[in-house]
Image: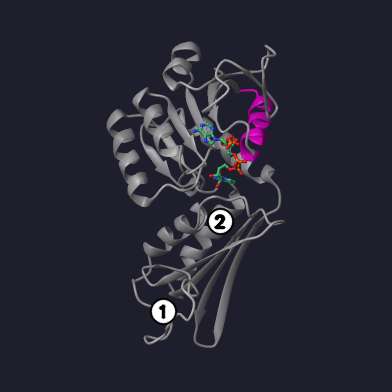
Amino acid sequence: MTIKVAIAGARGRMGTAAVKAIEEADDMQIVAALDYKYDGLFLHGAEATEEVGGIPIYTSFEALVADVKPDVLLDLTGPDAVFQNMHNAIAKGVRPVVGTSGLSFEEVAKLAEFANGQKVGGIIAPNFSIGAVLMMKFSAMAARYLGDIEIIELHHDQKLDAPSGTAMKTAELIMDVREPHAQGHPDEEEKLTGARGADIDGMRIHSVRLPGLLAHQKVLLGSEGELLTIQHDSFDRSCFMPGILLSIRHVMNQQDLIYGLENIIE
Ligand code: NAP
């Protein structure tokens, strides 16, 4: 059986790489692109044109579903679009596979409740890279012993949301094993707002945005007389593609919403 995939965000950097990866896979095909513009045009690479033969573009999800009946909606858009796209997909019984970051924990919980109630399988993966997932798992493992933690995430300067979805997910995994407590000196004072980063259960997250970077993260775990640093670097978007293909295959046999690729790899 060929899995029919619709994609939102197909003109973007991740989207164009994902379209290529899916088209190269034997067991799935791209059937449509969901966009907020270019209705009725066709996608050729990252360009929307009138030339028939590319991927048909829809601005209405209802019309897209009626015409091409996708099994999966892959969302690689941005923080303003992702919640509504996922909600629309679940409502129509189309399995969402989501790499877009920017969803809050509350939004993830709402979508999970909705998907589970509708028995629609799906996945939100803050990071599709297997190496990054291992970095998160190792961090949570180490946090059982070294509970004073600062996360430094570094991304390219076109990224819209901060902190990254990966940093949020890492913090969440650590929060499962770490007792909440304030870090640093009890009387510390920020001379410049934000200097100590975002506070999550007393842990700190720092977001760096610079041209030349792609996606990187260091988790620093400190204790008396020692420091453990767990680091992951993505140098190319190709590292996300195996996780996307794995997720698309996985949701076909699922009836609930999974948050995090670590839940589907051993
Ligand atoms: P990008 O190059 O800006 O691509 C996003 C695309 O989505 C753009 O073409 C944008 O169109 C389009 N878009 C915006 N709103 C839309 C809507 N309502 N419907 C359809 N398309 C819409 O960004 P990117 O680097 O590809 O990243 C996309 C998302 O993936 C980000 O949230 C990023 O953080 C995340 N990401 C996730 C992973 C992971 O492993 N999970 C890895 C890398 C990135 P315009 O160009 O017209 O604005």
- The residues tagged by marks 1 and 2 sit, at their Cα atoms, a distance apart of 25 Å
- Position of 40 with respect to 238 (left or right) is left
Q: Nearer the viewer, residue 3 or 159?
A: 159
Are there few (<14), some (14-19), or many (20+) residues within 10 Å of tag 2? some
Residue 134 badge: 2
Disc 1 is placed on an element classified as loop
Ligand 1 found in image quarter: top right
Q: Is residue 18 above or below residue 39?
A: below
Q: Indicate the quadrant where residue 25 lies.
A: top right
Disc 2 is placed on an element classified as helix
Q: Nearer the viewer, residue 48 or 116?
A: 48
Q: Is residue 142 above or below residue 62?
A: below
Residue denoted by label 1? 183
Magenta stretch containing residue 18, yes or no?
yes
Amino acid identity at mark 1: Gln
Q: How many marks?
A: 2
Q: Indicate the quadrant where residue 91 lies.
A: top left
Where is residue 126? Give x, y as percent.
50, 48
Q: Tell me the magenta residue range.
A: 13-27
Q: Residue at x 54, y 53 (%)?
A: 133
Where is residue 257? Give x, y as percent.
38, 38
Q: Nearer the viewer, residue 19 or 174?
A: 19
Dominant secondary structure (helix, strand or loop) of the stretch shown in magenta: helix
Q: Is residue 150 above or below residue 13?
A: below
Q: Residue at x 47, y 73 (%)?
A: 149
User: Is the C-beta of the residue carrying label 1 under 8 Å from the nearest atom of ligand 1?
Assistant: no
Amino acid identity at mark 2: Leu
- Position of 32 with respect to 204 (left or right) is right
Where is residue 148? Give x, y as percent.
45, 76
Q: Quadrant of the N terminus?
A: top right
